């Protein structure tokens, strides 16, 4: 690993992330055919800012957000340095693109992706930096061909970086997106990586780009295949019930949400991952043998 990171390399990362946000928004608008992303640029008083883009009430997408942020500060909060004491006394920059798409149709899965870069610096010392990211899929009525496609694209993105990369980051995704209080995964997984600085900077950056670029290849074919599937109020009610699990994970377990709130991030942008509608029902049990009951069989790590 090379510890040296030049300012122009940081700017290259930022330029890539801004272009990625543009590409994803433009492509999803074409897939939706009706909705458009509205942009909201913002500044953070402590340093940095971002541009949040949200789409609502499209033909396919009920609500979704694709956010870019680049925040900086003179020091990290104590809650962040408690587990990483080497970051104490360092200025920092954190930048990334994060997205969540909540479709209308219960047969179209919810999807999430993010790619990010972090660097902490102190005069006279080597910078501390890493990349992170991934993507995961949360279907309500899963289809094996969809899940296999999703994972095949994830595996393809990882392949140039070593045979062990996909299984390692797939396993990390299964473990990270796990609701301990429910005893189930959030969905059918994908990729998750963090603290990536084991290779030279350019290789780590290249991998982050490979993951970011793979999202549309993984998600769009699934959306196209399922967006016209007929559904009834029963499927809609189940979708809203399962969206509650998404809320539970993001508010209880998600490190990114916690980091954003602790570092004074923009609350509206951090919580844009929430679905527009969700519901909870005490003691809910799907009817035995129903399609809703079968979802349970998918909510555990598997070799797709």
Image: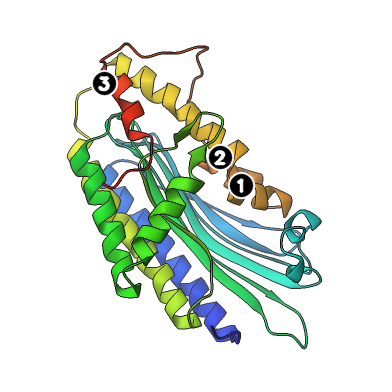
Point 49% across, 34% down: residue: 246
Q: Measure the C-alpha gap from mark 2 to mark 3.
A: 26 Å
Asked which secondary structure carries label 2, the reply is helix
> Is residue 11 in view from this perspective?
yes
Q: Measure the C-alpha gap from mark 1 to mark 2.
A: 7 Å
Q: Quadrant of residue 252?
A: top right
Residue pointed to by mark 3: 291
- Please give left or right for residue 121 compared with residue 153 in the image: right
Residue 98 spot, x, y in % from top left:
49, 54
> Is residue 115 in view from this perspective?
no
Q: What label sits on residue 257 in the rendered view?
A: 1
- Please give left or right for residue 23 compared with residue 45 in the image: left
Q: What label sits on residue 113 in the rendered view?
A: none
N-terminal-most mark, 2 or 3: 2
Q: What label sits on residue 250 in the rendered view?
A: 2
Pointer 1 with pointer 2, Cβ within 8 A: yes
N-terminal-most mark, 1 or 2: 2
Residue 263 spot, x, y in % from top left:
72, 55
Pointer 1 with pointer 3, Cβ within 8 A: no
Point 49% across, 20% down: residue: 279
């Amino acid at each position: 690993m090379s510890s040296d990171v030049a300012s122009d390399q940081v700017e290259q990362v930022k330029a890539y992330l801004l272009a990625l946000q543009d590409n994803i928004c433009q492509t999803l608008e074409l897939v939706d055919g009706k909705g458009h992303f509205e942009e909201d640029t913002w500044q953070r008083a402590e340093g940095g800012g971002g541009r949040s883009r949200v789409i609502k009430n499209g033909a396919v997408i009920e609500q979704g957000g694709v956010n870019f942020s680049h925040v900086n500060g003179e020091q990290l909060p104590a809650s962040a340095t408690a587990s990483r004491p080497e970051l104490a006394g360092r200025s920092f920059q954190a930048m990334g693109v994060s997205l969540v798409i909540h479709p209308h149709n219960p047969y179209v899965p919810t999807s999430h992706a993010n790619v990010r870069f972090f660097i902490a610096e102190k005069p006279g010392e080597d910078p501390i930096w890493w990349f992170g990211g991934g993507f995961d899929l949360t279907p309500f009525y899963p289809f094996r061909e969809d899940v296999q496609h999703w994972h095949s694209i994830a595996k393809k993105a990882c392949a140039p970086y070593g045979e062990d990369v996909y299984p390692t980051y797939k396993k990390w995704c299964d473990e990270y997106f796990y609701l301990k209080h429910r005893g189930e995964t959030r969905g059918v997984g994908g990729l998750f990586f963090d603290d990536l600085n084991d290779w030279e900077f350019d290789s780590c950056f290249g991998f982050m780009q490979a993951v970011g670029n793979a999202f549309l290849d993984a998600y769009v074919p699934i959306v196209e295949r399922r967006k016209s599937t007929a559904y009834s109020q029963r499927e809609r009610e189940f979708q809203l019930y399962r969206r509650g699990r998404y809320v539970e994970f993001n508010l209880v377990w998600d490190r990114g949400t916690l980091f954003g709130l602790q570092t004074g991030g923009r609350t509206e942008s951090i919580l844009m991952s929430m679905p527009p509608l969700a519901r909870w029902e005490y003691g809910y049990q799907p009817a035995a043998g129903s399609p809703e009951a079968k979802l349970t069989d998918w909510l555990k790590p598997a070799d797709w």
